[in-house]
Image (spheres, coloured by chain):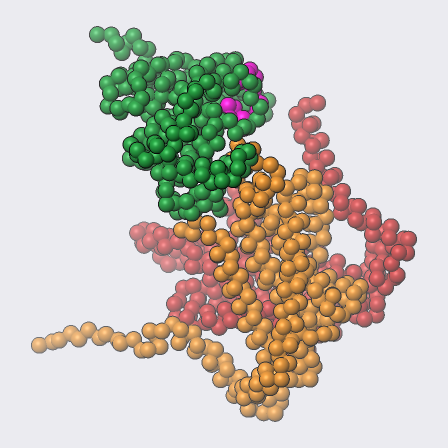
Chain colours: A orange, B red, C green
């Protein structure tokens, strides 16, 4: 009698949970890191042991130093984002609504946009110094560009059908703007805001690295690097990543609520 | 006037109006410098910027910086983009690879490339390696993401058609998968290249002994704004040129889409 | 018949029937494409008594939708005269309402906000506005869906909301541009009955463009048959049946056959020959 046992592999726990699989590689990286840090004094200079990183976290956390720098960076990013995007929406709306403004300002905007943000940094540094103003200005610029573009597109792309309904009910200019144009453009504006958020975060960190005066995670990182404190640097990198992710997630959530009238099917 | 003439006139009018405000700004700039409204440290006329460029060109400096920057960009981008392409495709094709690497990559992606600069300086020092690594990091993610999305986005029906007609794998890849995925992957390459260029200039601003970024930083320290502006102009032009050439390549390679 | 909605809405019924007379004289419209002039409507002459329901049928390209756009005032480039109650029309007006084939509700507004929008420029106190909106939502049987967004409504429901929006101003004349064209057959039949019921309560002048000849004779007091290239009026048929109508009435069927025959270019004499 030959029995054919169908070999059924009971899948190991690892295969069953993709989440655990996801942890594998990071854990490997951490293990390699830890190994390198103990290998020699020279390596310890670059790869500090996890223990030290943890200690620094406790130290900076309890002393409030970490918190101070986190809030400083957050504040710069938020200020720049709010100012830059508001101005951006305003310019985008004006360009979208008025043909005259579009013809006059449009080409100017596109010409200036060619100058990359990184190019503005040394210029602004020369003109306005190393302080908070320069940093905030850079962040404003970074949020400005995507907002103008997306708002403009949003307003220009309002369906003719909707405009006609406005005409049928004799809606005035302001009424049309408030009830037809802006809501129709909102999805585009929100897309622009997500981009502006990402750019503002990147440019905040960048400008803090390059203009090292004042508090901020970038500045903290820069100082730590100069003093060869890898533990603080790693800490800052982690903070930056987590904060960026949280803000992105939060905005995503908010935008879904604001746009709940959309057909999500 | 005939219709053709009318149209030509309209286009000419449109083009001239388009140049109106940039031209006005340019003239304002030159005028402000001539009148000496701003001190020399803050603003110099376009003519002076051009002079500075010629000065740097004659001394061979600008070529050296340009060459060094482009060299780093080339190597870093090639490494980062090819790794990105490989990983992106692999992750899209294999569930296992995706589960292993995607979370880690997503986490790293949250951190802007420039934020890694101090970290990488501590590990690699301020030599060439560090700059190449950071360019590679910046180049990696847009390409990986684009290829991942592109391969995942190939409709299941394409594979089914290949099955029905019993196409060999090579034909499947070459005739079906490649054309379907090349457009988004090319766009990914293009975005990755411009981002890498920006990150490189930023890295050079912070810590370098040569390169366009370093040239700008040196100009800033010496209060030579004309040199800074030459650097800004070069940065913008190179970025624009890279972007444009990629767009051209896109049009050429995927004629079927734009036809 | 929803008895409740009849009682509530009597105050919206036009009992006087002296307003809403439409007069069109020598109306012509053409488009310019490159160097060519393409006539869309030619020498349209029409007189419609107040409170009449007029259906317009015709082949594609006969300009029926264009005609409606001219009457509602979305397009002002035409030759000839369009008069409402002996006054030349100019641009759009709250006196002339329209319902399109695509409901054109604003996706970002709820049903009641959409209907309320029609009253923004209507000079009545805000309480009366709110009451009107509520009444008209009930009129079209959408009670309970006041706070729904258009994407949550079915095609038929959205179209009913669009009808309510067009009526809430009590326009003198209501234009319907293939209002049921985008709906499935069952919904169409149901909404045809609804349209009849709603119109019987409002009694404004109605002009409805439709592809469906059966719908045209069921709802209309008169059916205008149009011809294409260029668009002109071929024939006017009177429907001698009082409202409310029975869909199965034989006279309706006869008229439908007659009109269909005309649209397919078979002369009337031939079809009646023994």
**Measured from the top left, where is residue C182 in percent x and y?**
38, 35
Res A171 → quadrant? top right
- Left or right of A236: which side holds C99? left
- Left or right of C160: which side holds C78? right
- Left or right of C64: which side holds A216? right
Q: Is residue A72 visible?
A: yes
Q: Residue C77 in magenta?
A: yes
Which region is colored magenta? C69-83
Q: Residue A243 in magenta?
A: no
The foreground one among A236 and B249 is A236
**Measured from the top left, where is residue C268 in percent x and y?**
31, 10
Q: Is residue B197 visible?
A: no
Instruction: Name above or below for residue A34 compared with residue B160.
Output: below
Q: What residue do we see at 57% from left, 87% from top?
A: A55
Q: What residue do we see at 53% from left, 61% from top?
A: A251
Q: Residue furthest right?
A: B35
């Amino acid at each position: 009698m030959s029995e054919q046992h169908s070999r059924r592999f009971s899948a190991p726990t690892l295969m069953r949970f993709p989440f655990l699989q996801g942890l594998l590689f990071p854990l490997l990286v951490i293990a390699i890191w830890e190994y390198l840090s103990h290998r020699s004094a020279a390596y310890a200079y670059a790869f500090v042991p996890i223990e030290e990183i943890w200690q620094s976290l406790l130290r900076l956390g309890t002393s409030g130093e970490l918190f101070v720098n986190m809030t400083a960076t957050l504040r710069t990013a938020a200020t720049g984002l709010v100012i830059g995007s508001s101005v951006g929406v305003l310019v985008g709306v004006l360009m979208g609504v008025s043909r005259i403004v579009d013809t006059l300002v449009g080409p100017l905007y596109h010409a200036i946009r060619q100058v990359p943000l990184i190019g503005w940094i040394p210029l602004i540094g020369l003109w306005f110094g190393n302080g908070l103003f320069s940093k905030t200005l850079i962040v404003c610029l970074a949020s400005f560009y995507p907002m103008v573009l997306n708002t403009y597109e949003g307003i220009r792309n309002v369906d003719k059908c909707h405009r006609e309904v406005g005409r049928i009910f004799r809606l005035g200019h302001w009424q049309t703007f408030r009830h037809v144009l802006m809501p129709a453009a909102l999805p585009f504006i929100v897309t622009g805001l997500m981009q502006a958020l990402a750019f503002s975060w990147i440019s905040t960190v960048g400008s803090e690295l390059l203009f090292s005066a004042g508090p901020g995670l970038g500045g903290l990182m820069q100082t730590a690097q100069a003093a060869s404190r890898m533990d603080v640097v790693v800490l800052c990198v982690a903070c930056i990543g987590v904060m960026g992710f949280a803000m992105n997630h939060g905005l995503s959530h908010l935008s879904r609520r604001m746009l709940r009238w959309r057909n999500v099917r | 006037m005939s219709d053709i003439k009318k149209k030509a006139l309209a286009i000419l009018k449109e083009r001239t109006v388009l140049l109106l405000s940039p031209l006005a700004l340019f003239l304002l700039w030159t005028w402000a410098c001539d009148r000496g409204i701003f001190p020399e440290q803050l603003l110099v006329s376009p003519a002076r910027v051009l002079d500075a460029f010629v000065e740097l060109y004659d001394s061979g400096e600008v070529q050296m910086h340009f060459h060094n920057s482009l060299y780093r960009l080339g190597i870093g981008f090639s490494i980062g983009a090819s790794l990105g392409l490989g990983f992106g495709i692999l992750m899209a094709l294999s569930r296992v690879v995706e589960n292993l690497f995607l979370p880690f990559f997503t986490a790293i992606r949250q951190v802007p490339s420039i934020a890694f600069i101090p970290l990488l300086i501590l590990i690699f020092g301020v030599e060439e390696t560090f700059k190449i690594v950071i360019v590679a990091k910046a180049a990696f993610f847009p390409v990986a993401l684009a290829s991942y999305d592109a391969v995942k986005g190939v409709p299941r029906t394409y594979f089914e058609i290949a099955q029905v007609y019993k196409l060999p794998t090579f034909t499947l890849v070459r005739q079906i998968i490649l054309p379907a995925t090349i457009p988004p992957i090319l766009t990914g390459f293009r975005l990755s290249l411009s981002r890498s260029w920006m990150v490189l200039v930023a890295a050079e601003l912070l810590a370098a002994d040569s390169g366009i970024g370093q040239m700008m930083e040196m100009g800033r320290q010496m209060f030579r704004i004309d040199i800074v502006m030459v650097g800004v102009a070069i940065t913008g032009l190179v970025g624009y040129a890279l972007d444009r050439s990629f767009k051209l390549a896109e049009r050429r390679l995927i004629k079927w889409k734009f036809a | 018949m929803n008895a409740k909605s009849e009682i509530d809405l009597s105050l919206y019924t036009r009992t006087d029937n002296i307003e809403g007379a439409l007069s069109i004289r020598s109306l012509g419209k053409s488009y310019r494409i490159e160097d060519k002039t393409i006539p869309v409507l030619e020498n349209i002459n029409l007189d419609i008594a107040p409170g009449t329901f007029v259906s317009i049928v015709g082949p594609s390209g006969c300009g029926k939708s264009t005609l409606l756009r001219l009457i509602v005032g979305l397009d002002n480039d035409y030759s000839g005269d369009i008069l409402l109650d002996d006054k030349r029309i100019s641009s759009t007006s709250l006196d002339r309402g329209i319902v399109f084939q695509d409901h054109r509700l604003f996706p970002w507004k709820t049903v009641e906000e959409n209907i309320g929008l029609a009253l923004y420029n209507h000079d009545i106190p805000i309480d009366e506005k709110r009451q009107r909106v509520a009444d008209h939502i009930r009129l079209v049987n959408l009670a309970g869906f006041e706070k729904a967004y258009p994407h949550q409504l079915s095609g038929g429901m959205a179209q009913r909301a669009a009808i309510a929006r067009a009526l809430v101003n009590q326009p003198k004349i209501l234009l319907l541009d293939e209002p049921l064209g985008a709906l499935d057959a069952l919904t169409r039949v149901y909404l045809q009955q609804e349209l009849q019921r709603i119109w019987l309560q409002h009694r404004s002048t109605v002009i409805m463009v439709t592809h469906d000849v059966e719908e045209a004779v069921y709802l209309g007091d008169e059916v205008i048959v149009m011809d294409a290239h260029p668009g002109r009026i071929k024939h006017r048929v009177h429907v001698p049946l009082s409202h409310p109508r029975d869909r199965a009435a034989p006279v309706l069927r006869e008229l439908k056959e007659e009109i269909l025959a005309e649209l397919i270019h078979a002369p009337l004499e031939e079809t009646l020959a023994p």
